[in-house]
Image (cartoon, rainbow, N blue to C red):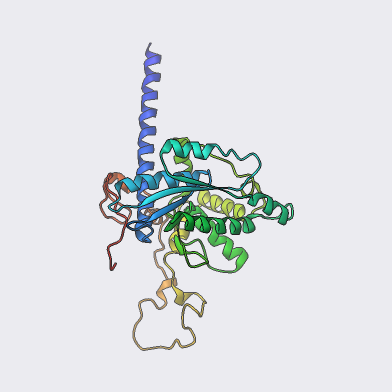
Amino acid sequence: MQGADTKAAESARARLKRERERNKLDKRLTREVGRAIGDFNMIEEGDKVMVCLSGGKDSYGMLDILLKLRERAPIHFDIIAVNLDQKQPGFPDDILPRYLTELGVPFHIETQDTYSIVTRVIEEGKTMCSLCSRLRRGILYRVADELGATKIALGHHRDDIVATFFLNMFYGGTLKSMPPKLVSDDGRHTVIRPLAYVKEADLIAYADWKGFPIIPCNLCGSQENLKRKESSRLIATWEKQFPGRIDNIFNALSRVTPSHLMDRDLFDFVNLKPTGVPDANGDTAFDAVDPVSPTAAASACGSSDEAEDGMAGNGSPITEHAVTFIRPQGN
């Protein structure tokens, strides 16, 4: 009898711990998505946001969190989920319509056989991502026009942004990543990444909790020789060996000092001359006496659980039931 009571008590403690962790995760994700939307003015009054839903954990999480934020936001905006069925062999085309219908979310399934095009044009063993991405992007832009969407939301997260930074640096020789907000190539669409501040590990835990009906990718996602996967493995290794390093790298993307790089288009080195006036940004940018610690970097990135104490990552108060993410005019 005593053994049964002990097991019941342990089970109750485990359940309470799991509920606390899930509550913290929910608040953290809501806070980080709301913060990204506010920082980059991603969503405005009257927007129609086209949420691109692939069937993966990231896009499911993005849709779920945006629906939650819409209920709490001080503005009105609409959401429509869009999936591009690329006619991959074995793709379960009934899962997303059923899920979205049960959720009560307006949706559109666009069917285009890009799979056959990509597999016909790209030599076996070669990376398909570039062509697949171009085809998919063009289709989504057209669909956005047809649906009257004012914003196109993609599910890239913090780790994707860091991985892209390394990809461009290692293989393209450029300092460039995925911006949280951009205007499309044709100059007609605004693309947003509401998950820009969110760690992939949190999205994995969220998908596991919510039990999203994940659909595996049999095209890009099945290719093991992708350079992006190499970058992701590097990031995972660094995070394990040096906790906080990825937070520092991510934060560095928003703390750029052009005068201490070498791009002459960003800084006028040619006409740079002494003025006789002290400049606080002179040599100090690379002379830091006390580098940012991993703990401080994680806090700055908003990865701590400060929300549990009623404070956002920047020290400002937040509330559980009201999320303000639209910047006032003039700021």
Q: Furthest-right residue in view? A: 123
Q: Quadrant of the N terminus?
A: top left
The residue closer to the viewer here, 176 or 284, is 176
- Residue ID at (43%, 46%): 63
For residue 47, above or below residue 55 = below
- Residue ID at (48%, 68%): 187
Quadrant in the rendering for residue 4: top left
In percent of width and height, residue 194 lies at 42, 54
Q: Furthest-front residue in view? A: 146
In percent of width and height, residue 324 lies at 29, 53
The residue closer to the viewer here, 323 or 174, is 323
- Residue ID at (28%, 55%): 315
Question: On the rendered structure, is 122 left or right of 302?
Answer: right
In percent of width and height, residue 191 lies at 46, 59
The residue closer to the viewer here, 174 or 285, is 174
In percent of width and height, residue 157 lies at 47, 52
- Residue ID at (57%, 64%): 168
Q: Is residue 305 visible?
A: no
Q: Quadrant of the C terminus?
A: bottom left
Q: Furthest-top residue in view? A: 1
Count of numbered tags? 0
Q: Is residue 263 visible?
A: yes
The residue closer to the viewer here, 181 or 311, is 181
